[in-house]
């Protein structure tokens, strides 16, 4: 009778292993493709907030790791958040194929989420950088256009315990160039990120290629 019990235990352990491994792999491979429109906080009270917003943050949010906590009930999770930050300078109409009106930079960041535990608030926290590196004098050394000439630093929070919540409340900072004595000073701006549907917002598709951006005749290597 004992060999039968032993064999049954081995089978049960094997089945448990088969179930546990795919679940773990699934957790580690979870990602959330998401597109957010950037809304100035002053514009958020409008009837249709952010309808004309020219900016999008398009991210793929992927599981990275778990953080240690002092409480057994606490669970804090780290996610990578990578993608692009786009800006559209169009006038009337929506000619998204016009290269003069599409601006893009790469975004690199991370998200930490926390479920509720004793002395551990719940929610999500995002930090990242939009790598705009533009010449304010537009000398033709690379992509031009848009309102940003230097990297933008993001810090955002949400009450939702989710890696890609519906909304984020953010502060961003970047160097501002206006030709005055204060040129190059850091500006701080409050914005919201609001999730939009990929298949209904063409601004999420904006991409800036290299075909129309090349060094001028004075450039040499």
Image: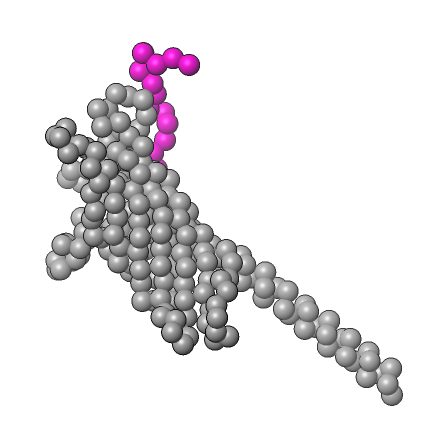
Location of residue 22 by image quarter: bottom right
Q: Position of residue 203 (x, y in %)?
A: 28, 45
Decide which of 209, 153 is in the foreground and name it: 153
Q: Quadrant of the N terminus?
A: bottom right
Left or right: 196 with respect to 189? right
Q: Position of residue 159 (x, y in %)?
A: 31, 67
Left or right: 18 with respect to 186? right
The residue at 26%/33% (across/down) is 149
- Quick check: can you spot residue 206? no
Location of residue 34 by image quarter: bottom left
Q: Position of residue 153 (x, y in %)?
A: 31, 45
Name the image colouring. Answer: one colour
Decide which of 23, 64 is in the foreground and name it: 64
The residue at 33%/42% (across/down) is 130
User: Total marks drawn?
Assistant: 0
The residue at 22%/28% (across/down) is 136
The residue at 13%/30% (across/down) is 181
- Quick check: can you spot residue 150? yes
Q: Quadrant of the C terminus?
A: top left
Magenta part, dominant SS? loop
Q: Is residue 19 above or below residue 215?
A: below
Q: Position of residue 134 (x, y in %)?
A: 28, 30
Q: Is residue 214 magenta?
A: yes
Left or right: 212 with respect to 11? left
Q: Give, as a single range, the part of the protein colored magenta.
A: 206-221
């Amino acid at each position: 009778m004992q060999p039968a019990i032993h064999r049954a235990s081995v089978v049960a352990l094997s089945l448990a292993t088969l179930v546990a491994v795919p679940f773990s792999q699934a957790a580690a491979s979870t990602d959330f493709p998401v597109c957010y429109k950037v809304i100035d906080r002053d514009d958020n009270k409008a009837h249709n907030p952010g309808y004309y917003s020219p900016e999008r943050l398009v991210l793929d949010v992927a599981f990275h790791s778990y953080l240690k906590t002092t409480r057994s009930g606490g669970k804090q999770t780290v996610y990578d958040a990578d993608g692009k930050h786009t800006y559209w300078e169009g006038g009337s109409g929506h000619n998204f194929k016009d290269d003069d009106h599409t601006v893009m930079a790469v975004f690199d960041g991370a998200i930490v989420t926390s479920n509720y535990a004793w002395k551990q608030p719940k929610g999500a926290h995002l930090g990242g950088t939009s790598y705009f590196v533009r010449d304010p004098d537009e000398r033709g050394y690379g992509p031009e256009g848009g309102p940003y000439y230097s990297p933008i630093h993001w810090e955002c929070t949400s009450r939702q315990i989710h890696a890609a919540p519906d909304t984020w409340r953010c502060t961003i900072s970047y160097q501002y160039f206006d030709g005055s004595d204060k040129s190059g000073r850091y500006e701080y701006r409050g914005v919201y990120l609001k999730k939009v549907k990929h298949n209904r917002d063409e601004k999420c598709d904006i991409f800036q290629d290299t075909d129309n951006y090349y060094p001028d005749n004075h450039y040499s290597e």
